[in-house]
Amino acid sequence: MIALRLALSCSSAPPPPAEPAAPSAAEAAGAVARFDTELRALWLEAGEANWAYETNINDATEAVASAADAKVASWMTTTIPEAARFDATPDKDPAVARQLARLKLAQTIPSPKDPAALAELAGLKTELAGLYGKGKYCQGENCRNLEELSRTLATSRDPDALLDAWVGWRTVSPPMRAPYTRMVQLANEGAREIGFSDVGSMWRSGYDMPPDAFTAETDRLWNQVRPLYEQLHCHVRAKLHERYPTQAPATGTIPAHLLGNMWSQSWENVYPLVEPYPHQPDIEVDSVLAKQGWDHLRMVKTGEAFFTSMGIDPMPATFWERSLFVRPTDRDVECHASAWDVGNRDDLRIKMCIQPTMDDLQTIHHELGHLVYDHAYVRQPVLFQDGAHDGFHEAIGDAVALSITPSYLQSLGLLEGVAESQEYVINTQMQVALAKIAFLPFGRMIDQWRWDVFSGATPPDRYNAAWWDLALRYQGIASPVPRTEEHFDAGAKYHIPGNTPYMRYFLAHILQFQFHEAMCREAGHEGPLHTCSVAGSREAGARLSAMMQLGASQPWPDALEAMTGTRTMDAAPLMRYFEPLQAWLTEQNAGRACGWTP
Ligand code: X8Z
Ligand code: ZN
């Protein structure tokens, strides 16, 4: 090697052009500091604009939100190549290197650089969000919004009314098909310009592991929980068949409109139809919330009190001034619950159209979980102001809400009698499983659909067919009426027009049991996992806070280890939690032909 160099230096050929030296580590640190300042300002502007839009959907707010999003996108298209200049910089500070690497993952929908394409994409994104937010099902003068239709699905037992609400909501989404198809094209161009094969591959790259390894992780976790889901499916199907003999067959798939939820994603509203032991004390609190006149403020204060009982800071004063808790009657609003960290400076808000139900009380804990996480990492650089991965963010509030046990509800005055019996345990476990176990295949399938759409494996003329193929394969559910490519049923689910990645919720449904188990250990709980509540445990709160403060500054296995002592996602705590129910379901299903044929 040395000889060769000498030989070259002695030759008479002109010297090759000098490679530009890689910029120094100090320059990299300087650039990252500048990116931090610029991104904070852009995200503040876009956050305010999108808040204004989603809490008041009209042409003017749409134009402002779209322009603000375009500004962020434009900054990304120039800054990501700037960051790439430091790829070869030796000896970068690890925190600087991690921020540089995270930059291109700090956007969900990447834009092409071309200004016309960039503006078009920003417009399509806001348009799609607006179509969903404004969505209504009208029969003549009588129009119903999503909450009203969802209430029918949750409470009616009239199959015709259920079908009407189910089909009715799906009339909002066919107009989304063309803009969605175009959005996929443009976003894929953007992804390719920054080195990803498509948007789905970019999304799968956000987990500190190669994208293919991530897909394998999601399959591994799904296979851990699938037997429990299949048992639940089998029992619920049998009970629905008893109630709706003509609509719900005893074998095969379950019709999607009979499960109490617009997307069949969680089934707690059919609890009365599947209640294992009807003569036990009541565990339903919706009627009590209504009777006691719980309003939105009391519900949010109750959620906040759970976190503060664990030693976690209360919400800032601005939270109470700026949040939207009730659907306004004078304008269109996107009512899907969300948590906002506007400008990453502790300006925390919830946007939610709260109803006095147990489901909404749970969701309030979910949203507050996002906000306490945001608050815990507010001192991190802006590119680390995020969950260890997005599933962590979705899991915090749910993990805490697993402590809303019957005894805790009794302490709130929402339950009168709490029994110690095994029958009562099975009833409560059934209620939790209808929410959490029913969700798992839904959580796994949504982004399978999107990954296939972005990669081109599912072309636009198969968008709807692919959606129902996956519902069949993962959930064992079928549409109650024939669906064609005139429909766009994916668009009737908020996260598709809203472009929120969904695998995070699947991961969160596994992780929350890992977090719960870790917090219960910290709180000194003894006995079965399902009997634990960490309400009032400062030790559990401290462990949770230590993990949350890290934000995204470390690879997620480090954060998971800090919280639970293990470095892998694992459904074993979930399976332990549901041990009593699983044994009971196995007995009930003996002699039934479980499963369905894809
Ligand atoms: O979208 C949400 C939250 C906001 S991040 C309300 N969730 C998913 C859904 O509603 O589909 C929570 C559970 C799954
Ligand atoms: Zn969430």
Image (spheres, rainbow, N blue to C red):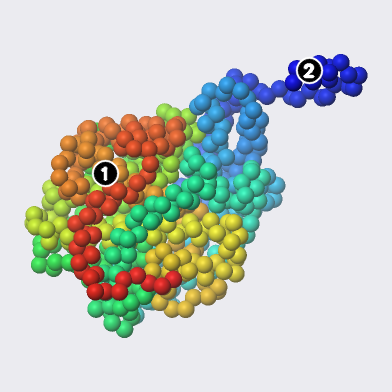
User: Residue at (10%, 63%) from the top-left corner?
Assistant: 280
Q: Residues within 10 Å of mark 2 (few under 14, many from 20)?
A: few
20 vs 191, left or right, is right
User: Residue at (28%, 61%) from the top-left corner?
Assistant: 434
> What is the residue that sits farthest to the right in this orientation?
12
Q: CA distance from mark 1 to mark 2?
A: 64 Å
Tally of numbered discs:
2
The residue tagged 2 is 3
Q: What's the residue type where badge 1 is placed?
A: His
Q: Position of residue 185 (x, y in %)?
A: 63, 57
288 vs 252, left or right, is left
Q: Which mark is residue 193?
A: none
Front-most of 499 and 472? 472
Say which of marks 1 and 2 sits in front: 2
Front-most of 596 and 158? 596
103 vs 398, left or right, is right
Circles 1 and 2: CB atoms closer than 8 Å: no
Q: Position of residue 297 (x, y in %)?
A: 26, 48
Q: Quadrant of the C terminus?
A: bottom left
Q: Residues within 10 Å of mark 1 (few under 14, many from 20)?
A: many
Q: Is residue 209 above or below residue 221?
A: above
User: Residue at (26%, 35%) from the top-left corner?
Assistant: 541
The residue tagged 1 is 516
Mark 1 secondary-structure assignment = helix
Check mark 1 vs ligand 1: CB closer than 8 Å? yes or no.
no
Q: Position of residue 288 (x, y in %)?
A: 16, 59
Q: Position of residue 569 (x, y in %)?
A: 37, 44
Q: Quadrant of residue 275?
A: bottom left
Kindly tell me whether residue 345 is visible in this rendering.
no
Q: Earlier in the sequence, mark 1 or mark 2?
A: 2
